[in-house]
């Protein structure tokens, strides 16, 4: 597994372990999956934003469109 993905999986696991509402046998898997997916999406958006900082206007416009498309598809509000 990719090192970054492993790091995100560990963050999601820690989130579940630290959440008192998580019954690991019933809800923990769902909570882990949701948090892991959120972290992956956030990481993707951060990469788009990082790339757009050092790009020309046309490239930046395309990256902003990709960011908005991902946010809309997953129902994420802009930061």
Image: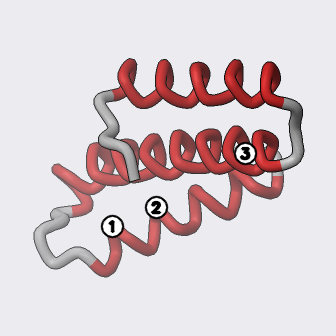
**Residues tagged 3 and 2 counted as in contact (Cβ below 8 A):** no
SS state under label 3: helix
Left/right of residue 67 with respect to residue 76 in the rendered view: right
Whole-angstrom CA distance, mark 3 to mark 2, is: 19 Å
Q: Residues within 10 Å of mark 1 (few under 14, many from 20)?
A: many
SS state under label 1: helix
Whole-angstrom CA distance, mark 1 to mark 3, is: 25 Å
Identity of the residue drawn at 60% across and 58% down: 8
- 15 and 77: which one is in front? 77
Q: Which mark is residue 49?
A: none
Identity of the residue drawn at 79% across and 20% down: 58
- 21 and 8: which one is in front? 8
**Relative image position of residue 69 (x, y in whole percent):** 48, 19
**Residues tagged 1 and 2 counted as in contact (Cβ below 8 A):** yes
Identity of the residue drawn at 87% across and 37% down: 55
How many numbered callouts?
A: 3
Splitting the image into 4 quarters, where does residue 28 fall? Answer: bottom left
The residue where tag 1 is placed is 16
The first of marks 3 and 2 along the sequence is 2
Splitting the image into 4 quarters, where does residue 33 fall? Answer: top left
Whole-angstrom CA distance, mark 1 to mark 2, is: 6 Å
**Relative image position of residue 27 (x, y in whole percent):** 19, 51
**Relative image position of residue 67 (x, y in whole percent):** 56, 30
Q: Residues within 10 Å of mark 3 (few under 14, many from 20)?
A: few
Check the image and report above or below for 24 versus 73: below
> Which quarter of the rendered picture does the N terminus lie within?
top right
Left/right of residue 10 with respect to residue 73 in the rendered view: right
Identity of the residue drawn at 72% across and 45% down: 47
The residue where tag 2 is placed is 12
The residue where tag 3 is placed is 47
Left/right of residue 76 with respect to residue 71 in the rendered view: left
């Amino acid at each position: 597994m990719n090192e970054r993905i492993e790091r995100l999986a560990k963050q999601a696991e820690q989130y579940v372990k630290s959440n008192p509402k998580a019954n690991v046998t019933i809800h923990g898997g769902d909570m882990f999956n949701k948090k892991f997916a959120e972290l992956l999406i956030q990481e993707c958006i951060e990469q788009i934003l990082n790339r757009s900082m050092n790009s020309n206007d046309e490239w930046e416009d395309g990256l902003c469109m990709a960011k908005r498309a991902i946010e809309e598809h997953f129902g994420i509000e802009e930061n």
